[in-house]
Image: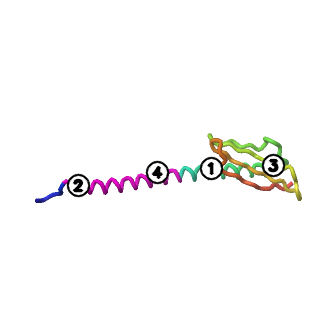
Amino acid sequence: MKGFSLVEVLVAMAIMGAVGVAVLSALVTSSKTVALTDTKETARNLAETQMEQIKSQPIYQEGSAIITCPPGYSVTINPSDARDMNLRKFEITVFYQGKPIFSLVDYKKY
């Protein structure tokens, strides 16, 4: 007899199904990783842009350096009260959907 038996066909289908599930699982994991990386990279860029804007101003005034954020993102600026050696510390935190994603601490010289 020529051809495949029913058992051989079922085994081949089971193997193909297992391989398909593994490939789809890998695709889902990689797409989640890419989305998370994109979110963190956007947050880092926002924080760095915000800090550069603060540094470009001669004197920092509350609310004067807020940048426009993409939907879902927000930025908070926490300047230190102390000024040591003509330096002022700034902590910039970027939130995505209300959760902190990235924080940047830097200093501005006065």
Q: Which residue is mark 4?
A: 28
Q: What kind of element bears circle 3?
A: strand
Residue 74 point in image, percent of width and height: 68, 42
The mark that comes first in sequence, 3 or 1, is: 1
Q: Main secondary structure of the magenta part?
A: helix
Q: Is residue 63 left or right of residue 102?
A: right
Pointers 3 and 4 in contact (C-beta within 8 Å): no
Residue toward you, 3 or 89:
3
Magenta extent:
6-33
Q: Which residue is mark 3?
A: 79
How far apart are the two marked residues, 1 and 2, measured between alpha carbons? 49 Å
The dot on residue 9 is 2
How far apart are the two marked residues, 4 and 1, measured between alpha carbons? 21 Å
Q: Which residue is mark 1?
A: 42
* Protein image colouring: rainbow
* Residue name at image x 83 percent, y 43 percent: 61
Q: Amino acid at mark 4?
A: Val
Q: Amino acid at mark 2?
A: Val
Task: Give the tally of numbered discs.
Answer: 4
Q: Is residue 75 above or below residue 85?
A: above
Q: Amino acid at mark 1?
A: Thr
Residue toward you, 7 or 64:
7
